[in-house]
Image (spheres, rainbow, N blue to C red):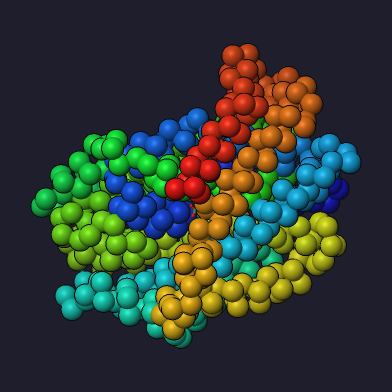
Amino acid sequence: MKGRNSFGSRFGVLVAMAGSAVGLGNLWRFPYLLGEDGGGAFLFVYLLFVVVLCIPIMICEFLIGRRSQTDAFGAFKELVPGSKWGFVGLMGVFASVFIVSFYSVVGGWSVNYLVSSLQFKFTSGSCDPSEMFSTLVSSPVKPVIYHLIFLLFTALIIAAGVKKGIERYTKLMMPLLFVMIIIIAIRSMTLPGASAGLRYLFKPDFSKIDGQVLLDALGQAFFSLSLGIGTILTYASYVKKEENILKCTAYTSIADTLFAIIAGCAIMPAVFSFGLEPGQGPGLVFVTLPGIFAQLPLGGVAAILFFFTLFLAALTSCISMLEVIVALMVDEFKMKRGVACVITFIFFGISGTLCSLSQGTLADLHILGKNIFDLCDFCSANILMPLGAIFIVLFVGWKMPKPDVIDELTNGGTVKTPAWLLKAIYIIIRYIAPVFISIIFLAGMLK
Ligand code: TRP
């Protein structure tokens, strides 16, 4: 599309994709699911899914976006004229509505923790991390305000546009976050009794694997890699034709997975060393980390740096989700970027507030046996993302002409790719991915 924004450089693309992938999914959601779903067994299936299913799905999304150069709704029509597959893009928008609603609340928690770290609360000796967390999330006003602050940052950066907004901030923050999480992991692994946590993490007990664990691991792999809702598709639509798709997707997945594993090494040993309950749910990271900072030389400063980078990581991921919606409003409804941002801010301001209140004031309001926060998480990661992924691989495997797929993967034959690799990827896309995702999806649903 003429006049469409695009990323400034190869490094910019990679950084934006990694910025989308690395976020609260790695540092908050992954460790607590690990704790709930049996540690090593969960990690094992998770890694398997990333390599066998998720990388090919990411390739599909990337390919659709880059070839069509348009938003997640228009892309399908653009590639197969007359096709009605635009609904996949709409489903993605629907899914982002669920995700952003709770994601921005957790983003707000991280802003609150940043503020607390600036007051050196974690190292003052008087902080009870469990109580601090539960008081924060169940209060009716404070987390709502922090959620709105987080959302405002997101909307402002999106309004500034892709290149100026997303690329610039992400480049700076990723390396710093990486250094911080490594420092925390090293301290955590050297705490007394840490080895029990490492065993929990790396010694799988395969008897723990059931339909629920499989679906959780699949949902988490999609969540962490930003798959199934058109995020990668939308970002790829800003990518120039010369970039190498296989390289971009491989680097992104490796960076994201490395982050998740290191986050596991940072959290699990400390959980065991402090005698905490690994399966306590969404508070796990927020309760465990302050304890590690208290044990770290210059822990107060480390906490500030960590929560600052965590906030930025959450921000870049949230931006990538909102961008799906804003891009669609701009490309399909010809709305001004700024107007689209204002509308989304108001909408998520309200839906996020409901999610936040469901941790306290509205805790008794249950739909399908879940509070609003958990319902949003469940509907997106366990239902809409797997469904979206199935449709995306079916589209590339069965609707798009094979020569188009190969042409896009190899940039018109200019990128030398081994024939066996292309063949393997195509077989996964056409047969293995749709069948396996469907089976896991049904197994988890019918449990
Ligand atoms: N992957 C991000 C994280 O780990 C969250 C995220 C960004 C996301 N874009 C997405 C999740 C699209 C699902 C779909 O925090």
**Residue that lies at the very extreme toward the right in this rendered image:** 82
**Residue that lies at the very extreme toward the top in this rendered image:** 419
**Residue that lies at the very extreme toward the bottom in this rendered image:** 141
At horizontal 68% and vertical 41% (from top left) the residue drawn is 391
> Where does residue 66 sit, x and y in percent of width and height?
73, 39
246, above or below 19, in the image? above
- Foreground of the two, 261 or 281: 281
> Where does residue 147 sit, x and y in percent of width and height?
51, 75
Q: Describe residue 265's horizontal placement relative to residue 407 as left or right.
A: left
At horizontal 37% and vertical 52% (from top left) the residue drawn is 33
At horizontal 63% and vertical 69% (from top left) the residue drawn is 155
164, above or below 364, in the image? above
- Foreground of the two, 274 or 37: 37
> Where does residue 278 sit, x and y in percent of width and height?
26, 56
Whether residue 103 appears in this view of the structure is: no
Quarter location, residue 110: bottom left
Q: Describe residue 150's horizontal placement relative to residue 202 as left or right.
A: right
- Foreground of the two, 89 or 335: 89
Q: Describe residue 118's horizontal placement relative to residue 214 as left or right.
A: left
Whether residue 445 appears in this view of the structure is: yes
**Count of picture labels:** 0
Q: Describe residue 308's horizontal placement relative to residue 318 as left or right.
A: left
At horizontal 40% and vertical 83% (from top left) the residue drawn is 139
> Where does residue 303 sit, x and y in percent of width and height?
31, 65
**Residue that lies at the very extreme toward the left in this rendered image:** 192
